[in-house]
Image (spheres, grey):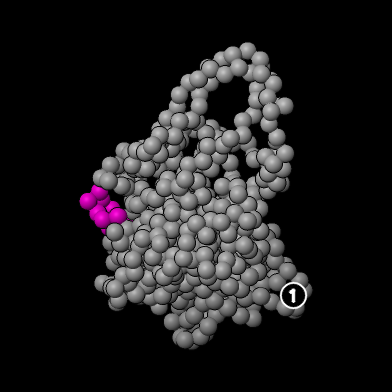
Amino acid sequence: MGCSASQPETVSRKQNNINSDEKVSKMRCPSPKTDTENVPVTVVNKNQSVTMASVKRSHSNLKETYNYQKIDQHAREVSKMRCPSPKTDTENVPVTVVNKNQSVTMASVKRSHSNLKETYNYQKIDQHARKAPNSVKNSAEELVKYMSTVSKDPRMLARGFFVWSSENIKYDVEGFFGRATKAPNDAESVMKNGRSVCEGYASVFELLCRKAGIPVKKISGFSKGYGYSAAKPLTLSTSTDHAWNAVQLEGKWYLLDSTWGAGHLDSETNSFKKKFDDFYFLTDPKQFVSAHFPYMDNNLEESQKWQLLPKPLSLEEFNKNVEYKPEAFRLGVLAISHPQAYFEMKNEVEMTFKSKGKEEITITARLMLKEGNWLKEQRNTTFEYLEKGANKLLVHPKSPGTYQLTIFGKLVSDDNNEKIPEIMEYIIKCTEVKDKDHEYPVAFGAASTERCILHEPLRGNLPANTQVQFRVSAPHLQHVMVEHTYLEKSGTMFTGNVTTHAPGYQVSMYGTRGEKHGRLDGLYKFHTV
């Protein structure tokens, strides 16, 4: 099986692809009842499978026969790590059935969802995992023992294994691209060599959990990672390209991807960019399925259970849905007008996005023409603005063809000058373009922060030596100027006519909240032709 690393944050210019010891506790909590009843007990068979039997027990007062000091102390230590869980909905989810061959299958039970990322503090185990000595790489048992010195809580151990993998396993880029022999993917080799693809990351996590006695499953399937294109739908005959894990904590199954949690492949440099991403640890199943579709042993029905959803997606739905990147979920962005990743258009299309969060977001976009295996950037072909709480995006290609449209987003209040994170990606087939010279104006950051809406002109290339009407709404600005002409204000609308210069000149629009002759911020830029 090949392996797909996560999509890069930058846009590509070139396209490229419980075997643990079972422990039965000797400590039993007595019931206050004193009558006799049938109770189930665990029976561990010779082949390590687990069955249940029914025996008689008398509920006598066992407090005099057991010392609870050690277990009480441990319970109090564990309780300090957890905050109360939020209210959740209940749904059918799979549970573990351990077969004779140690494989894991699924049955259906009720569970209550909780956002574990908000209820647990992982700082201590994260730091401990990152400081792990090199000596533990040679033994899964030693690594489990090392992690257990901080906490024996299964959730904390799983987190430690997740973080340790991100720090100590390098993605096998050379093997992935066929430039060298692929590194082995078995867990022991990966731990020692520190190099593999997704299969190895998932194998290591599986081995560590089993050694720690934590129910775990390695899952393979399809992903919307490196090399994926919405224009080429996946089928059941397509080779699976990714591996990840499911882990059972307190009787509930959760999903994680330690490969994508470690970083992503950068298609511009064909290198692995190490960047820890907490999003892929115990991810909400509704979010995880945006880019992961389990498919194992040619059994779709059984595989779909590992989506951990009450109503699993079909492969057709998985193909059609636009992929929400981690930042899209953090911002609460929804694709309102175009929820499908691939669509056809003519001339111009208007797209609508909206955030579920309380804070407004700003989006930008980049359109790339696909020419064989290459992507060619199309400048001034997208235009974004905020209208009535929704983010609008206009797209106008310059010629028919197939395009990759990448959407980026951040909070309006975010003043960070780093790259704006990618939130979604589309493939667009444009079948007709009437105005091949069309260009949009260039919008500066102040246009977004000041909630400006440019009504006209919506062309970036203006006719030279011509009177052009400008109209922009700006609820927070006191003055708006185009070149040396101030526009007339009426309410929140600014209007005025400006005569353009000769061809090749730049025409800029500025605005200010303050005095007329004070500092002006750039809003939009045009040019004459």
Q: Which residues are magenta?
A: 230-240
Q: Is residue 244 above or below residue 57?
A: below
The residue that appears at 29% across and 77% down in the rendered structure is 179
In the picture, which quadrant includes the C terminus? bottom left
The residue that appears at 47% across and 58% down in the rendered structure is 140
The residue that appears at 43% across and 58% down in the rendered structure is 204
**386 sits left or right of 34 in the view:** left
**513 sits left or right of 326 in the view:** right
The residue tagged with tag 1: helix, strand or loop? Answer: loop
**What residue would you read off at disc 1?**
516
Q: Nearer the viewer, residue 501 or 159?
A: 159
- Quarter-of-image position of residue 230: bottom left
Does the rendering let one see residue 294? yes
**Residue 468 included in the magenta stretch of the image:** no
User: Which residue is farthest top?
Assistant: 35
**33 sits left or right of 231 in the view:** right
